[in-house]
Amino acid sequence: MLFMVVEKFKNRDPEPIYRRLAESGRSMPDGLRYVGSWIEANFDRCFQLMECDDATQFMAWIREWRDLMEFEVVPVSPSAEVRALFEPPAAG
């Protein structure tokens, strides 16, 4: 499954996060895959697209980073797949 992860940087300060990334990487458990990320222009939040099949993988990862940011994890689906749910059935 895909998940949009909204990270809110404590004190709007991404520097401690980038420092930890440089020192020890993303610290992601097996099965949790980083797809991409975008940073808000005011350094308030980061939006990450991630993929996994087990919510406990997120819990383990969040535990490693919760001292530097707050998290919101939202399950998402590609819009093309959702649009297909609303297409009329094929004539048979």
Image: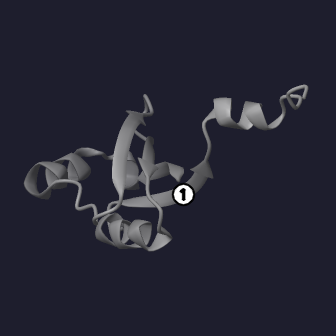
Name the side, left or right, on which 6 lies relative to 82.
left
Residue 41 position in % (x across, y down): 43, 28
Residue 54 position in % (x across, y down): 47, 68
Name the side, left or right, on which 61 lies relative to 52.
left
Residue 67 position in % (x across, y down): 33, 68
Residue at the image position 34 percent from the left and 62 percent from the top? 31
Name the side, left or right, on which 75 lies relative to 8.
right
Question: Dot 1: within a 10 Å radius of its alpha carbon, few (fewer than 14), some, or many (20 or more) residues?
Answer: few
Residue 61 position in % (x across, y down): 34, 66
Residue at the image position 23 percent from the left and 45 percent from the top? 15
Judge by depth and name the residue closer to the eye, 90 or 8: 90
Q: Residue furthest left?
A: 23
Residue at the image position 45 percent from the left and 33 percent from the top? 40
Judge by depth and name the residue closer to the eye, 12 or 91: 91
Q: Which type of secondary structure does the marked residue at label 1 adopt? A: strand
Up-down: is 70 above or below 48? below
Up-down: is 82 above or below 30? above
Label 1 sits on what residue type?
Glu
Quarter the C terminus occupies: top right
Q: Quadrant of residue 39?
A: top left
Up-down: is 71 above or below 2? below
The residue under label 1 is 72
Check the image and tell me how it is coloured.
one colour
Residue at the image position 45 percent from the left and 51 percent from the top? 8
Q: Quadrant of residue 28?
A: bottom left
